[in-house]
Amino acid sequence: MPFLDHLEELRWHLIRSILAIIIAGSIAFAAKDFIFDYLLFGPKKQDFPTYKWLCNAAQYLGFNEGFCLDELPFRVQSRTVAGQFSAHIWTSITAGFIISFPYVIYQLWSFISPGLLKSERRNARGFIFISSLLFFLGVLFGYYIITPLSLRFLGTYSVSAEIFNDFDLGSYTALIRASVLSAGFIFELPILVYFLTKIGLISPDIMRKYRKISLVLVLTLSAIITPPDIASQVIVAIPIMILYEISIFISKSVFKKSQQTPQTPAKKS
């Protein structure tokens, strides 16, 4: 296809993806009671499952203080005229993107798959399912691990007894959106490694060689997306390193198949 025809094809895939996000976002917009009261403000309540797990684990290990909370000592308020409406809109867009992610990936795959060989398309079978599964696992990890750890640390942090934490609604929802989406995209690492290995940009040897550097990068990333305490960073870093090791295995498998591709023997004169 000519270059302009490729752009036209891409435009329609983007339009269909945006329409899917808008439709799913509209459903989320209408379900604001469930989205806000149950999902967004769930991690603010002391009976949230993660806080129970932390409390039980701390009691089992003999560390009671700081992990079992009666309540999170902060309130969420809206301090701007359009604060609640703006939070409603952005939360609905984020929820629409998460809900429609499999369809968005399908549109991406529909655009790039015609440029692949038949064998490559066959080897990449299940791409939509696997990438969607990894993304949803990342979203759950961000919601049940990163978000409560961040709120527990930031909500209880105090420099003076004279100061009470009143978090703005926009700041509160932005923290949850960032935690959920960043974890969702981080969990796409095996898919990214698969395609980078496929086109020859990385190899399993390169990933093994820079494993220590990757560990430092993972810890740095964990420090960015989590509160600055060692326990939270380790909890977040462990699954990311597991994903990295899985990615090495995937890269090894793809690289091995590419090396075993039969080559046409030279004709004898």
Image: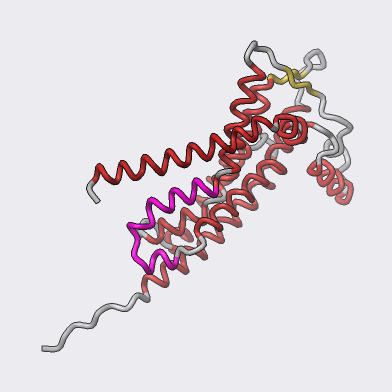
Residue at the spot 65% in from the left edge and 52% down from the top edge? 238
Residue 214 horizontal side relative to residue 59, left or right:
left
Please state, as top left, top right, bottom left or bottom right, where the C terminus lies in the image.
Answer: bottom left
Residue 113: in magenta span: yes
Which quadrant of the view contains residue 46? top right
Report the residue that reaches farthest toward the left.
269
Seen in the picture, residue 37 relative to 210 is either above or below; the reply is above
Q: Is residue 231 visible?
A: no
Q: How is the image coloured?
A: secondary structure
Which quadrant of the view contains residue 151? top right
Residue 87 horizontal side relative to residue 186, left or right:
right
Residue at the spot 59% in from the left edge and 34% down from the top edge? 25
Seen in the picture, residue 124 relative to 173 is either above or below; the reply is below
Residue 217 screen position, x and y as percent? 53, 45
Report the residue that reaches farthest toward the top.
81
Residue at the spot 29% in from the left edge and 46% down from the top edge? 6
Residue 32 horizontal side relative to residue 116, left or right:
right
Residue 28 screen position, x and y as percent? 65, 34
Residue 18: in magenta span: no
Secondary structure that dominates the magenta span: helix
Q: What's drawn in magenta, residue-wise?
A: 102-123
Residue 120 screen position, x and y as percent? 39, 65
Report the residue that reaches farthest toward the bottom.
269
Q: Nearer the viewer, residue 259 or 40?
A: 40
Q: Is residue 202 visible?
A: yes
Q: Nearer the viewer, residue 246 or 231?
A: 246
